[in-house]
Image (cartoon, coloured by chain):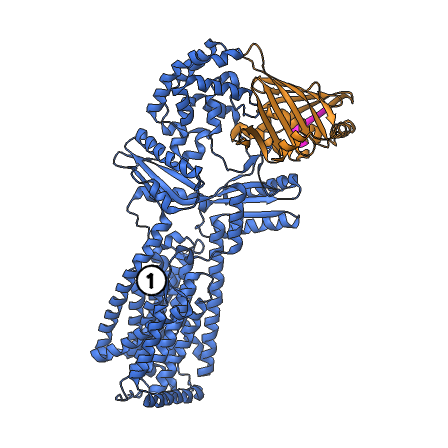
Amino acid sequence: MKRFFALLLTVVLAPLAHAFDLDQLAAQLAKPAVVRGPFIQEKHLRALPKPLTSTGQFVLSRDLGLLWLLQSPLQQDYRIDGNGIAKRTPQGWQPVPQQNASAQQNRLFLAVLKGDSSGLRQDFELSLSGEASAWTLDLVPRSLLLKQIFTAIQISGGEQVSRIELRETQGDSTVLRLTDSHADSQLSDTDRHAFAD
Amino acid sequence: MLSRIEHWGPRLFTVALVALLALTAWQWRAGAPISANLLELVPSDTPDLLEQRAEKIIAEPLNRELVVLISFPDRQKALRQTAVVGLRWQQEKLFEKVQWDVNYDLAQLRQQLLDSRLALLDSAGRQLLEQDPRAYVERRVQDLFDPFHSQGLLSTEQDWLGLGARIEKSLPHFHNVQVDLSGALLAERDGKTWALLRARTTGDAFDGNLPLAVENLVAQARADIEAQGGELLASSGLLYSAHGQRQATSEISFMGSISSVGALLLMLLAFRRMRVLTALLPAAIGVLAGLTATVAVFGTIHVLTLVLGASLIGVAIDYPLHLLSKSWTLQPWNSWKALRATFLGLTLGLATNVIGYLALAFTPFPALSQVAIFSSAGLLGSYLCAVCLLPALLGKVQIVPWAKPYGLAERLLDWRRRVLRRIGTPWLLLLFLLFCAAGVLQLQHKDDLRQWASTPPALLQQSQAISQIIGFQPTSQFYLVRGKDEEQLLQRQQVLGERLDKLVADGKLKSYMALSQLVAPASEQASLRDSLGRVPAASEALQALGVSREQVQAEVRQLQALPTRNIEQSLAGSLGEPWRSLWLGEAGNGEVAGLVSLQGLSNTELLAAQADGLPGVKLVDRLGQLNRLFAATQISAAELKLASCLLIFALLCLPFGPRGAARVLAVSLLAALASLASLGWLGQPLTLFSLFGLLLVTAIGVDYAIIMRERVGGAATSLLGTLLSALTTWLSFGLLALSSTPAVSNFGLTISIGLAFSFLLSPWAGEHDSHTDKDLVQ
């Protein structure tokens, strides 16, 4: 799941200078200072008849990071920024300890998020199809480590990213829909506050 | 007897010398047998073999691992350049393993995780699952929805209950090191990204030239990286070792050459014949003999011994100087005649010096034993050379010394006589004692192993920076835990672990590693197996997601079928790797043992207190033990001092009688006292090394007193001889005071001050003008 945010951000932030359309896409996605909207996350597990679905709202700031406000089935606010992942508790934002092994992925993507734009091209084979109003970006991992985790990642959208699908080597997949997101020129006061402390 | 020496001495000595050279060559056949391992210098007689084994394990990463961090403003460049360095180092035979990225075999990890879920579940998870299975399942479901909860290596359907995910989370890690998408190891701090590279050498930090070779590679890599605008930090025991070796080599060559050149100039100036330069030969042979004897006894010679041994040149050259100084009165010069006249004095001098040095050998510190063996053998070699070979080498050359010093010496003695007429010796003694008392009162005692090695600030800074950046600070203290079987061992570690957890929570300890963190005792694995049966009935939260109770039951059956794992089995594979070195296995008398290693320590006493009341748990604190041992050794130093004085006294009684012997000894003891007082006045600490320096002051100072008492060739000639040898000895010990190793510098300072006083006091060794100067021509 967390892979999505990072990838989402990467796509938004990364100057994809590969081909002319990648450049365009990068420019297009980098335009709004803030993007916000609802999300639906579906975790498709091979052994389960229906996906694990969670919903909520997100706020993506080009400069500050991402707020992920999970509303159902449980309420929980998350924040990704330069300092890592944090969780809102009654005592304020608590950093989520980032553990080893496969959880390193959290860090991997955070590293990308922190401005390692060229890292994406180093680690994934990128191919873009479609046009500015309806495009699809396919990412195929290059490194041995990543190949053991993902088969492929697919991101699609128009003005904004609208869908991300991640297929895992184990056979599970996760789909993230951002169907109704819209651009904004600035953060709301509450959001700014959430990023500030 | 001496005429026989005249005949046989040169021949026999030449044969012995050839044998010595052959032995030395054989010892050096595989490179210099030089060691920089401080631990070789301190007593290793921990009676407990297990403890010794444990110490080796704990010290190994410090002595064999090299940690390098590379940073560039462009992060990708840092990764690339780190890989370049890593690939280059992989080609080197020095390294057993070079790692700059991870390429886990995830399939193998997954399988291991699946197979040992029951044994490896952390104790908090075990407790929750046993006491409140419903809460456990609810927590698991929350985690499944938590977007930032790592999904883990196992797919969810393999791990509905999340045991695998929990185990993964409890795996240890370098606190700040992350794995990049490509698998590269990265750490970030203060806005800089560092790529991490670790290398493990084939040998350890004390293997011959290995440290220097590693240092060289690091220097090359650093030059490369810096030339491209990057930054490189490196830390390793190997680098400290290399620094120690290099420092010692340069200090030895510096001190050795200055004191040799100084002695050479002094001799040319005084005796004005090129031929007298052969008198340097005994000193050279002395150093050679010392080196060879030390390697023969200890296997290697420590750099500290070498540095201290370099001062031997100054002492060893005394023998030829005594001999040559007789040329001021023995005219026409005849080497063999001079030898005959000074033979007794030289032999007594050798005996007292060797007594002084050998006293060092009886301390529990191999450091001092090495110096003792080196110096005794060196002095013996030098003495033999001076007695057997030197007169033959000097041959029939006529030595007509520079007359001026002789006049100066006479004037000095005259001046002393006049002073003594005005102020009596008792008054001078009183003043002297007052000076000593005031100085001794200001003395401060300080001993620390860190004084034994010079720690270059540049290396220290890098080590500190690295441990901050990657958040890893290994300490040399650890707990040794024993138990009658694995069950008891793990339980004892658990209890200790609970106490340590509190220290970690209070910020007094950064972290620790214990076998009990990895694997549960067999009894707890069994009780977990039993209580798993209650989980399906409490798994409503999973059912709400669509996971049927049958699926949960199937997983529970699988888990229950997993065999109980012992420590050995749990340590296999990559999951157990971080803990592997902590398992000692059989500890003798039917016990098993394991270690608990510590990181980021703040307070040793606090650690010792954690083991209180825990049977089978012991804090091993080598550094602390050593520092306590230093204090204890002072007492033995005093005893040795007394013993060596008695021995020297007995020896001196032979030629001088009890009265004369007491007088000669008193002079050198007063000099040692004055040296001690001077340390106080100078604000220098009294250390183990200065104490042993004082031992030597007595031994060498006795020489001067003997010469002044014997007065072969008259008081002025003897004073000149004493002055010459004192000058060369000062030169070498005074140079030691410049050493960057605090212990060596302290040692040199103590001795040079002591010898200055020995020289000043030596005229008092003679009786009040009641003597008759010995006639040289007899």
Q: Which residue is mark 1?
A: B373
Chain A's colour is orange
Answer yes or no: is residue B594 visible: yes
| Segment colored magenta | A121-127
- Front residue of B137 and B198: B137
Q: Residue at x 30, y 68 (%)?
A: B356
Q: Residues within 10 Å of mark 1 (few under 14, many from 20)?
A: many
Residue that appears at 52% across and 11% down: B544
Name the quadrant containing residue B31: bottom left
Q: Left or right? Give the position of A131 relative to B453.
A: right
Amino acid type of disc 1? Ile
Location of the C terminus of chain A by quadrant is: top right
Relative vertical location of residue B507 with respect to residue B287 in this rendering, above or below: above
Report x, y in % for residue B1. Answer: 26, 78
Q: Residue at x 33, y 57 (%)?
A: B630
> Is residue B332 in sight in this rendering?
no
Residue B464 falls within the magenta-colored stretch: no
**For residue B617, above or below residue B754:** above
- Determine the colour of chain B: blue
Could you tell me residue B41's position as x and y percent?
37, 55
- Viewer-nearest residue: B702 or B686: B686
Q: Is B673 left, or right, of B250 in this rendering?
A: left
Query: Dot 1 falls on which chain?
Result: B
Q: Where does residue B701 sit, x and y in percent of width and height?
A: 33, 74
Nearer to me, B17 or B524: B524
Q: Using the image as rendered, state which of residue B224 and residue B55 is in the foreground.
A: B55
Q: Is residue B425 above or below residue B528?
A: below
Q: Does residue A37 appear to the left or right of B40 in the view shown? A: right
Q: Is residue A125 magenta?
A: yes
